[in-house]
């Protein structure tokens, strides 16, 4: 049985050190090629006509003038007459032309007649009585549940309890299956009671999405010494990847598609394109060298990826490039669901949490959306939650870095912080007191809380909430906790050792800027004892072994494990060939510093090159494959904890909030590259400052359109907004032996709550909703003064 | 009615002379019927003055980019950024907002940082254009590029070329910047991945070495 285990601390030369990102040089030189940069011979440029209405029916389309225009090579109706459009900016017609200006002109010549329908783009608190109680589940509701990854058990019991509105046919069931429905769910659907009368009712925009109770909240609140009530929330924000979504597609022959696409999911794209394009997945080749940001919004080819391929076909197979314009990127290509809640929490005098109640709501666009996991991190013994999902016309939601967790952190940690204030307790003491509710991560959080307090100088900086005089620059500190899974995904890695000593590695993974390439090379180099630059790494192509999509912080665990396996197996195979030459047994050999030598006797060794020559003429290729999910993980693991603290300064005259310092203390098991790991935390804090202070997808209730679909008014934090940032990674004993765990999501979860809590500490009153804009801060101050 | 050779005859003709901003061109382009001919400017009278009008068809243009000459026939509404990227395959400068809000397309025009998406190609003729591609000489990174590598100042890297060019221009002007200089001088570029901490360190590294 090969020993794949990670080397222990004294045998690690690279793992856990600070290694510079291997693809930095091409990036800083402007040589890294992104999908947007791909220029294929004879490439045509596509443009898209988008619906200006948030809710409308397409009545007629006249493309004749566009088709006649010189330079136009293909016109493709994406959503024809009769289709209902559910959000502004949705695609109606696409055009491919010899250059962009021509395509733009052609779009202007297309006439579309719409019938406008009533729209809803607001996500304010649902009106009492307007909410649809649980009833038979519609097929859309089942879709939503799958999208929201409602556990199979819960789905089965709800289908059982409420029945369904219509009988799904096999095609529909197949769709569900593809969206991840388990056999148990499909079976429940087949057997469910059908209530067609209820289904014919128009669905309300407000749907009760969850209602659950644990323990005895009534009694617990009655017995609590202190009860705090508050309103909290996080609006819809967008992903705003700097490289917009899009692809360049071409047909190399009538049955074979070659597509360059900006994606977090290279290996997973063909399977999603095959059916709509009616060709086998194996006929689809996907390639991507670099990606300019995804953050959860780039797992699918999207409708535009499909019609880029279709329009290419219409244009005789010529390459067609369709990259989204910035306004479309912000309107249709990614939004994080909103979440708001009225929260009531109760504790005993000593701070022990006893009861939680939340009435939450939020929107994920037309699909409604699910309840964030609240109360977050702290399992308060008695709790009741009710969540209402708002279906509206703001555009579809997508996974946004740590889906649902940043919202959960705000709703929970801000409510708990207000309770601590009511108890007159220092939050560090209050949260510290309740850490037993965070099992199984209690010890991690305890250590992290202590380190974070130290790094923030919390004792010096924290003060009880107090009255401030207007005109003051008020300072305050706040904190938050978060958690995430992050076990490695399925990943295959091919590693080849050539007889001349050269080594290459191929994986169908992608590097989102998280350092994936760097980490793969670190692991291979550490295992084979040869320098990183002696190994050639190729990723980002469907001709390489499949590797999972980069979502949910699963990539590092996935690729590091499969690379470790491949490298270990290849090394062992090499040892078998080399052992006779060194007069020893294969298990007596080791690879260190570019040599294959007998353990404990470095005088008996061969250089790497000499050793590889023992392979003869044939290269040695080994595939590393991760054990499947049903088995316990070995090289990777799941479950991390993090604590963050923020210090802010609030100008009480202008309402402007400035973050002055942030501290992130984070565990992620065994760190492969400390440098890029820390960068994940720095980047996450910066992104967090951005969504805490500035970001919001602002919708115009009358036109139903996004008002700030550009980067001037959809404000991202800039360099001048960024204060001193401190990152501390939890490593060493107790952490390293857990194996490799993902880090992309966790550190982006807490900033909203930590910063909101710091502002409350500074000005003595809660600003209920993010982003903490000057108008909201002033309104909160005013309300406090009036109270 | 049109002077085919106007452009060639007046190679030093100030590109500002058409007096039409990109914004105006965008408006004008809306009413244009595509005329796929390559043609020089026409002279018309507007507000009592003679104004040369280019387009709406393609116009021959010449550029000096990274010390080399480039020629292309482009519509006057084409931006410098699109000319660089789509005509000359210099894709270091990125198209992100395409309206002067993010800095991803930053290049140097006569040594000054410029948003290439906010300048028409026709206006950039006969000026010295420097793109990120030219900063690396014989495979050796420019000190600011090396500092980006050392301080992990790029993640996805899409904002990086724009930042590198902006930082170079900034450091040329402020070899010993104060933190306040940095805050002000580099607020015109945006990064989604959050690399600002690394960028600040990179600038400090170069400023220190230069000292
Ligand atoms: S693309 Fe030019 S400033 Fe954003
Ligand atoms: S590194 Fe990704 S946008 Fe800056």
Image: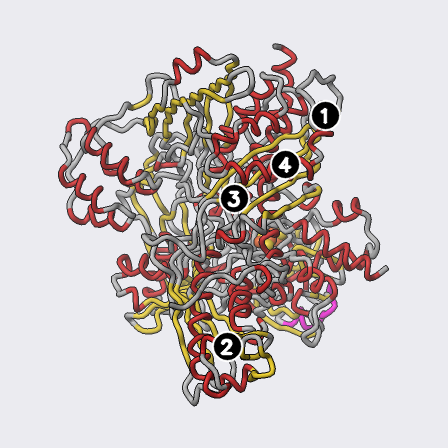
Residues tagged 3 and 2 counted as in contact (Cβ below 8 A): no
Q: How far apart, in angstroms, are the residues tagged by discs 4 and 3? A: 19 Å
Nearer to us: label 4 or label 1: 4
| Label located before the other in sequence (1 or 2) | 1
User: Looking at this view, is A415 or A166 the one in front?
Assistant: A415
Rendered location of residue A634, percent (x, y):
42, 56
Q: How far apart, in angstroms, are the residues tagged by discs 3 and 2? A: 40 Å
Establish if A603 lies above or below B115.
below
Nearer to us: label 4 or label 3: 4
Tell me the chain of label 2.
A
Secondary structure state at the residue bearing disc 2:
strand
Report whether the residue tagged 2 is closer than 8 Å to ligand 2: no
Q: Is residue B41 left or right of residue A633?
A: right
Establish if A29 lies above or below A576.
above
| Label located before the other in sequence (1 or 3) | 1
User: Looking at this view, is A540 or B7 the one in front?
Assistant: A540
* Mark drawn on residue A474: 1
In terms of image quadrants, where is residue A165?
Answer: top left
State the residue position of label 4.
Answer: A450
Q: How far apart, in angstroms, are the residues tagged by discs 1 and 3? A: 29 Å
State the residue position of label 2.
Answer: A589
Rendered location of residue A533, percent (x, y):
58, 73
Is there any visible trace of residue A68 in the rendered image? no
Q: Residues within 10 Å of mark 3 (few under 14, many from 20)?
A: many
Secondary structure state at the residue bearing disc 4:
helix
Residue range (magenta): B5-14
* Colouring chosen for the image of the structure: secondary structure
Residues tagged 1 and 2 counted as in contact (Cβ below 8 A): no
State the residue position of label 3.
Answer: A746
Query: Residue at horizontal 34%, vertical 62%?
Result: A270
């Amino acid at each position: 049985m090969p020993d794949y285990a990670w080397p222990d601390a004294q045998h690690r030369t690279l793992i856990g050190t600070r290694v510079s990102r291997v693809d930095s040089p091409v990036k800083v030189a402007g040589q890294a090629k992104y999908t947007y940069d791909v220029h294929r011979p004879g490439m045509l440029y596509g443009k898209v006509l988008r619906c200006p209405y948030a809710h409308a029916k397409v009545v007629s389309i006249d493309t004749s003038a566009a088709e006649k225009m010189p330079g136009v090579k293909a016109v493709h109706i994406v959503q024809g007459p009769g289709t209902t459009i559910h959000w502004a900016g949705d695609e109606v017609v696409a055009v491919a032309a010899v250059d962009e200006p021509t395509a733009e002109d052609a779009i202007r010549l297309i006439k579309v007649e719409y019938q406008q329908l009533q729209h809803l783009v607001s996500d304010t608190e649902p009106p009492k009585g307007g909410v649809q109680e649980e009833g038979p589940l519609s097929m859309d509701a089942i879709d939503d549940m799958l999208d929201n990854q409602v556990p199979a058990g819960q789905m089965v019991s709800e289908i059982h309890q409420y029945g369904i509105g219509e009988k799904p046919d096999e095609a529909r069931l197949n769709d569900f299956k593809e969206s991840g429905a388990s056999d148990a769910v499909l079976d429940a659907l087949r057997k469910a009671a059908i209530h067609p009368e209820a289904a014919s009712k128009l669905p309300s925009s407000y749907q009760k999405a969850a209602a659950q109770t644990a323990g005895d909240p009534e009694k617990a609140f009655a017995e609590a010494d202190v009860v705090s009530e508050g309103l909290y929330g996080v609006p819809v924000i967008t992903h705003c990847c700097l490289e917009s979504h899009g692809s360049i597609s071409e047909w190399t022959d009538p049955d074979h598609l070659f597509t360059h696409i900006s994606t977090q999911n290279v290996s997973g794209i063909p399977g999603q394109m095959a059916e709509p394009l009616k060709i086998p997945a194996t006929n689809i080749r996907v390639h991507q060298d670099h990606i300019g940001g995804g953050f959860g919004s780039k797992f699918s080819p999207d409708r535009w990826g499909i019609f880029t391929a279709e329009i290419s076909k219409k244009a005789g197979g010529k390459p067609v490039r369709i990259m989204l314009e910035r306004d479309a990127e912000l309107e249709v290509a990614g939004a994080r669901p909103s979440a708001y809640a009225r929260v009531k929490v109760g504790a005993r005098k000593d701070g022990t949490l006893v009861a939680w109640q939340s009435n939450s709501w939020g929107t994920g666009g037309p699909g409604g959306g699910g309840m964030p996991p609240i109360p977050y991190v702290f399992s308060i013994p008695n709790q009741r939650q009710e969540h209402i999902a708002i279906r509206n016309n703001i555009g579809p939601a997508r996974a946004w870095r740590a889906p649902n967790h940043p919202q959960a952190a705000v709703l929970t940690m801000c409510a708990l912080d207000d309770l601590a204030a009511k108890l007159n307790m220092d939050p560090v003491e209050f949260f510290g007191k309740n850490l037993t509710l965070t099992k199984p991560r209690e010890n991690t959080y305890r250590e992290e809380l202590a380190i974070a307090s130290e790094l923030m100088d919390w004792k010096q900086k924290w003060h009880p909430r107090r009255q401030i005089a207007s005109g003051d620059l008020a300072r305050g500190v706040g904190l938050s906790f978060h958690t995430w899974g992050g076990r490695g995904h399925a990943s295959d890695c091919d590693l080849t050792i050539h007889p001349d000593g050269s080594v290459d590695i191929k994986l169908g993974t992608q590097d989102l800027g998280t350092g994936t390439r760097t980490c793969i090379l670190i692991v291979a180099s550490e295992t084979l004892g040869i320098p990183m630059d002696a190994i050639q790494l190729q990723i980002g192509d469907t001709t390489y072994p499949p590797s999972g999509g980069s979502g949910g912080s699963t990539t590092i665990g996935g690729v590091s494990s499969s690379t470790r396996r491949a490298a270990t197996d290849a090394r062992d195979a090499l040892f078998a060939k080399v052992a006779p030459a060194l007069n020893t047994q294969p298990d007596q050999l080791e690879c260190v510093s570019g040599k294959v030598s007998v353990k404990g006797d470095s005088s008996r060794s061969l250089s790497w090159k000499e050793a590889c020559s023992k392979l003869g003429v044939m290269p040695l290729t080994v595939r590393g494959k991760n054990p499947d999910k049903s088995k316990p993980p070995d090289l990777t693991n799941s479950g991390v904890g993090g604590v963050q603290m923020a210090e802010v300064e609030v100008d009480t005259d202008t309402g402007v909030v400035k973050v002055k310092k942030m501290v992130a203390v984070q565990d992620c098991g065994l760190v492969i590259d400390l440098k890029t790991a820390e960068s994940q935390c720095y980047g996450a804090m910066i992104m967090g400052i951005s969504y805490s202070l500035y970001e919001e997808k602002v919708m115009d209730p009358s036109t139903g359109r996004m008002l700030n679909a550009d980067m001037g008014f959809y404000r991202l934090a800039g360099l001048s907004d960024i204060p001193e940032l401190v990152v501390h990674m939890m490593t060493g004993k107790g952490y390293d032996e857990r194996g490799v765990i993902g880090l992309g999501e966790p550190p982006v979860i807490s900033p909203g709550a930590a910063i909101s809590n710091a502002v409350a500490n500074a000005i003595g009153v809660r600003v209920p909703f993010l982003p903490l804009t000057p108008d909201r801060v002033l309104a909160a101050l005013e309300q406090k003064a009036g109270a | 009615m049109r002077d085919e050779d106007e452009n060639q005859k007046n190679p030093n003709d100030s590109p500002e002379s058409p007096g039409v901003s990109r914004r105006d061109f965008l408006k004008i382009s809306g009413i244009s019927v595509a005329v796929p001919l390559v043609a020089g400017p026409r002279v018309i009278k507007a507000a009592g003055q003679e104004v040369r009008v280019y387009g709406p068809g393609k116009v021959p243009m010449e550029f000096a980019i990274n010390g080399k000459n480039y020629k292309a026939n482009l519509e006057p509404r084409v931006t410098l950024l699109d000319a660089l990227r789509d005509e000359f395959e210099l894709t270091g400068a990125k198209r992100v907002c395409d309206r002067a809000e993010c800095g991803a397309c930053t290049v140097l025009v006569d040594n000054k940082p410029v948003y290439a998406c906010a300048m028409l190609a026709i206006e950039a003729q006969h000026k010295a254009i420097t793109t990120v591609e030219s900063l690396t000489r014989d495979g050796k990174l420019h000190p600011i590029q090396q500092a980006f590598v050392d301080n992990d100042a790029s993640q996805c890297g899409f904002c990086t070329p724009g930042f590198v060019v902006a930082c170079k221009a900034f450091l040329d002007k402020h070899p010993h910047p104060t933190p306040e200089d940095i805050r002000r001088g580099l607020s015109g570029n945006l990064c989604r991945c959050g690399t600002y901490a690394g960028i600040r360190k990179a600038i400090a590294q170069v400023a220190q070495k230069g000292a």
